[in-house]
């Protein structure tokens, strides 16, 4: 049986995870989700890997959840499904390494949710992102009710979700839904270059910054308290020692 999540290394410091069921447009079923959980955990634990790229095979990122497996769940089955979904969501959201989404083609429903759990989204010019949950009588999941407002603001998030809108790459860039748009043939290379750049950042400080950003929205005084804790930790880190030494020696830091 072929793997539903392919793993390769464009560079020693990069791991690329590819959703690999193009016949079903990489729809997320239980097997793919479980493989993705396993491979993300492995990539996070890999000391050589400084950044992770998430993408899809067959010029499609992810068409959403596997609809064929829906419609037959009882309450217990629904709770189990959501518990496993949230296991994956939490792994991505709390990942301390940079995670870059290389988005080609469709990112619909749960696929859009996966993309928005990444730190940076690099989209192809023919990509489109949609939120068709209401068409299936469902609420947005995969963390979208949290991640989408943080990306585009509450007013635009409400419009996109409540109207079940799909947007093309150009409009997604205007809204802040994606970060970069390139011709389709450049998406993988551009994502890899960006992942290398982000992976060269100081690991401890990068992870702490992600932790703080993940707590928003919060009150200003709370933000300052979290900032204080994070910065004191950085003051004590090897990365900070290396950054200061590199500055004094007028060389590039090697984190």
Image (spheres, rainbow, N blue to C red):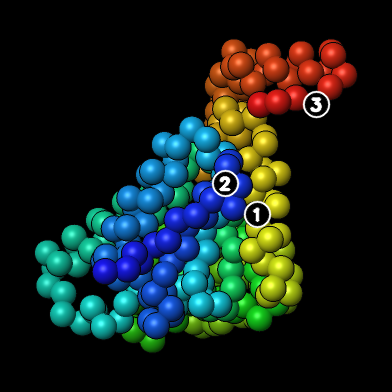
Towards the viewer: 11 or 46: 11
Coordinates of residue 162 in the picture (x, y in percent) = 48, 78
* Mark number, residue 105: none
Q: How far is mark 1 from mark 3, CA to CA?
A: 21 Å
Q: Secondary structure at mark 1?
A: helix
Coordinates of residue 116 in the picture (x, y in percent) = 53, 60
Q: How far is mark 2 from mark 1, CA to CA?
A: 8 Å
Name which residue lies at 26% across and 61% down: 82
Of marks 2 and 1, which one's residue comes earlier in the chain?
2
* Mark number, residue 14: 2
Q: How far is mark 2 from mark 3, CA to CA?
A: 21 Å
Name which residue lies at 52% across and 64% down: 55
Residue 243 appears in the rendering: yes
Quadrant that contains the C terminus: top right
Q: In the rendered view, tell whether residue 226 sits above or below residue 244.
A: below
Query: Crowdedness of circle 3 by 10 Å Cα count: few (<14), some, many (20+)?
Result: few
Quadrant that contains the N terminus: bottom left
Towards the viewer: 16 or 160: 16
State yes or no: discs 2 and 1 in contact (Cβ < 8 Å).
Answer: yes
Of marks 1 and 3, which one's residue comes earlier in the chain?
1
* Mark number, residue 192: 1
* Mark number, residue 252: 3
Asked which quadrant contains residue 121, the reply is bottom right
Name which residue lies at 49% across and 54% down: 8
Q: Secondary structure at mark 3?
A: loop
Of marks 2 and 3, which one's residue comes earlier in the chain?
2
């Amino acid at each position: 049986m072929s793997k539903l999540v392919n793993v390769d290394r464009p560079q020693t410091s990069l791991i690329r995870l590819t959703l690999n069921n193009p016949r079903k447009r990489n729809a997320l079923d239980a097997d793919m989700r479980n493989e993705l959980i396993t491979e993300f955990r492995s990539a996070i634990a890999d000391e050589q890997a400084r950044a992770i790229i998430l993408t899809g095979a067959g010029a499609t990122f992810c068409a959403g959840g596997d609809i064929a497996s829906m419609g037959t769940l009882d309450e217990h089955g629904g709770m189990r499904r959501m518990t496993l979904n949230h296991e994956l969501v939490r792994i991505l959201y709390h990942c301390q390494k940079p995670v870059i989404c290389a988005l080609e083609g469709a990112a619909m429903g749960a696929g859009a949710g996966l993309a928005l759990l990444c730190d940076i989204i690099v989209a192809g010019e023919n990509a489109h992102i949609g939120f068709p949950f209401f068409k299936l009588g469902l609420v947005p999941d995969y963390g979208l009710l949290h991640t989408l407002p943080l990306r585009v603001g509450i007013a635009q998030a409400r419009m996109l979700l409540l109207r079940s809108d799909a947007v093309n790459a150009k409009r997604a860039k205007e809204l802040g839904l994606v970060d970069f748009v390139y011709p389709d043939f450049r998406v993988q290379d551009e994502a890899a270059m960006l992942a290398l750049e982000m992976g060269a950042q100081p690991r401890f400080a990068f992870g702490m910054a992600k932790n703080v950003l993940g707590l928003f929205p919060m009150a200003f005084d709370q933000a300052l308290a979290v900032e204080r804790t994070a910065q004191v930790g950085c003051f004590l880190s090897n990365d900070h020692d290396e950054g200061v030494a590199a500055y004094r020696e007028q060389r590039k830091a090697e984190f």
